[in-house]
Amino acid sequence: MFALTAYASLLNPKRKEDVALWLMGAQSEEGWSKSFVTLFDSVFSENHLSLKCLIRSVIASLIAVMAIWLLMGNADLIGLRMQSNLSLGWFLVTALVVNVIADYISLLETRWLLGRIPRSTFAQIGVLIFDFPISAAIIWVAIFLYLRSPLREGDVESFAEILGVFSVFSVFFYSTFLTSVWTWGYITSTWIMRLATRLRVAYWLDVENKPIKVLFLLLSTCLGGVTFLGAMALGTLFSADQDGITAADRTLCKVFKGQVCLEVAELTDAEHRQLEFLSSACEGGATDECMKRANAIWEVDGATAARLSRAACQGGSAISCSNMGFLYKNGIGVNPDSRQSARFYRQACYEGYAGGCTDLGMLHQDGIWMDADPLRAAELFRQGCDAGSARGCTNLGVSYEKGLGVDPDPQEAARLYQQGCDEGDPSGCTNLGFFLLEGIGMDPNLQEAKRLFEHACEEGDAAGCTNLGVLYHEGTGVMPDPQEAARLYRKGCDGDLADGCTNLGFLYVQGLGVDPDPKEAARLFKAGCDRGNATGCTNLGRIHQQGIGMDPNPEEAARLYRQGCYGGDMQGCALSMFNIMGVDVFDDAE
C-alpha cells in the first residue's frame, strides 16, 4: 500500500484528474478511444508504414518470442510435447525469418481495429472472438511458407500440431497473439469504465481525491475474477486424466484427427488409449503407423490388427482395405465374411491398389460368396497385372494355362509367368520353372528350371521348394540327394503345401534321407490329405490297411481310398474298387 501511495503522489495532477473523470464516466468513450490510439501511436510511431514502426515491431516481436519460449520452457512443454532441446539463439534467428513480417502485419491489423471498435458490448465481444482467427491466419501463412521453403528441412508440421504445442513453431504462432493485447486492453478498459459508472463508484468511494487507489482496487478485483475464471477454464482444459491425456488434447484429436492424434498417443503409456488415438490418426489420413502395426501383429492379435486396418482404410489407405479383405476372408480378428471380404477387396481395387484387384479376382475364380466367374476373374487379374501386381500377372498366367475365362495359350501363360517372376512373385518363378522343365510353351531348359525353383524357394514359395526337392529326389539335372530332398520337402510342407507333406511322408516310409518312421509318415500323409493331396489320402489308406505303425483299420482305409479316388488319384480308385489285401503298400507309391 505504501508503494501505491508513493506512486500516486508522483503522478501528474492532470493525469489524476483524467483518471478520476474516467472512473466517473465523465470522459466519453470516443475520447477514451482517441487517447488509447494516441498511446499506441506513441509506442510504435504515428506513421505505421515507416521504418521506425517496423523496427519497433521487430523488437516487440523478439521480446514476445522470448517470453513465450521461456513460458513454455518453464511449463516443460518444449521438452515433453515438442521433444526439442533447441537453443534460444535458434529461436531468435528463426523468429526474425518467420515472425517479423507476420507480427508487423498483425500490428497493423490491431491498429486498424483500434480506430474502428464498435461501442456495443456484444459487438466488442465479437471483435475479440474474430481477432483470434485473423491473427492465426496471418502467422500460419508465414509459418506455412517457411516450412515449404528451401530454408527448412525435414517433416512439415500441420496446423493442428502447432496449435496443440507439438511443434517448436508453436512458439512463433502464439507469440503473434501478444499484439492483440492492445485490442483486449482497450475493450477491457472500456468495460471497467462502464462498470465503474454503473456501480456509482464515485458515490461510494473517494474517486475525486484518490482516483489511483480506486483504479487499482477495480483492476485487482477484475483481474482476480478473470484469473479465477481463467484458472478454472485452463484447469478443465489442461488437467490430465489418469492416462496423462488432457481434455484439450482429446478435443484437438477429435477436431483435426490425422497426425496430431499420433502426437497425443505418445503422451500416454496406456495401450488402450494409444490404440484409440492411433485409430483416430489413421481415420484422419495418417495411415502409415496403423499399417505398420497391423502388419506386425495380425498373427497374434487379429482383433487389434482389424481395428487398425479398418481405420487406415477409412483414412484412404487402399492397401489397408485389401488387408481388411484378407482378414474377413480368413476370419482373423473378425468373423469370417466373404461378402465383406469382397467389399473391401473391391474398394482397394477401385482406389488404385493392384493387389486388391488380384484378390478380388481370386474370389470370382473360386466362387466365394458369388457364382464362379472365370471371365471376370481373368479381367481382374489383367487389371491387377497392368497396375503392377506381380501376383496378378501370375494368376492371369494360370488362367491362360488352364483356359479359365480365356482361350488356352501356353506361350501367353509363359510370358505372364515370366512377368510375374521378374516383378517379384516367387510363384510366377515356380510356374515358369515347371514350364521349362516340361517344355510347355517353350523349349525345355532343365538348368534354368532348377535356377527358378531355387530362387522361388529362397523367396518362400513352398511349391518352388517342393519342385526342387523332386529334382534332388529323382536326380533330375543334379546328383540324387535324398537328404536335400527331405529338407526341401519339409520346407514345402511347412509352407502349407500338400504335395510337400505327401512327398516327405514317402521318404519316411522308405527311409530315404531320413530314418524310417511309419508314424511320422502317417502324420505327413494325413497333412497332405487334409490339404487336398489325393495321393496322400491313398497312401494313408494303405498304412491303415496294413497296420504299419498302428492297428489295422480296413474301414478307414476304404474311406481314404475313396477320398483319394475322388481327388483324382487312380491308385486310390483301383484300391477302392478291388479292395486289394496283403499288397506291399509302397511298391509304386509316389
Image (cartoon, grey):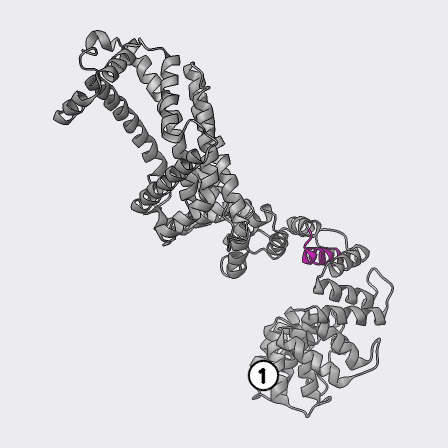
Q: From the viewer's side, name the closer residue of 470 and 114.
A: 114
Q: Is residue 356 left or right of residue 127?
A: right
> Farthest residue toward the left?
2
> Farthest residue toward the bottom?
479
Q: Which structural element holds mark 1?
A: helix
Q: In terms of secondary structure, what is the magenta stretch mainly?
A: helix
Q: From the viewer's side, name the closer residue of 82 and 444.
A: 82
Q: From the viewer's side, name the closer residue of 551 and 73.
A: 73
Residue position for label 1: 518
Q: From the viewer's side, name the closer residue of 307 and 488.
A: 307
**Quadrant assignment, res 53:** top left
Q: Where is residue 197 in the image (x, y as percent from the top left)?
A: 29, 10
Q: Where is residue 27 in the image (x, y as percent from the top left)?
A: 33, 11
Residue at 33% x, 39% y is: 239
Q: Can residue 164 be seen in this view?
A: no
Residue 544 versus residue 100 in the image, above or below? below
Residue at 54% x, 59% y is: 295
- In reply to whether residue 187 is colored magenta, the answer given is no
Residue 115 versus residue 391 in the image, above or below? above
**Quadrant assignment, res 546:** bottom right
Q: Position of residue 44 (x, y in %)?
A: 39, 31
Instruction: Give the residue type at disc 1.
Output: Pro
Q: In this view, does 165 lie to the left or right of 256?
A: left
Callout 1 crowding tier (Cα within 10 Å): few <14, some 14–19, many ≥20: many
Instruction: Please provide the residue range marked out in magenta.
Output: 352-365
Q: Quadrant of the C terminus?
A: bottom right
Q: Quadrant of the N terminus?
A: top left
- In reply to whether residue 360 is colored magenta, the answer given is yes
> Farthest residue toward the top?
203
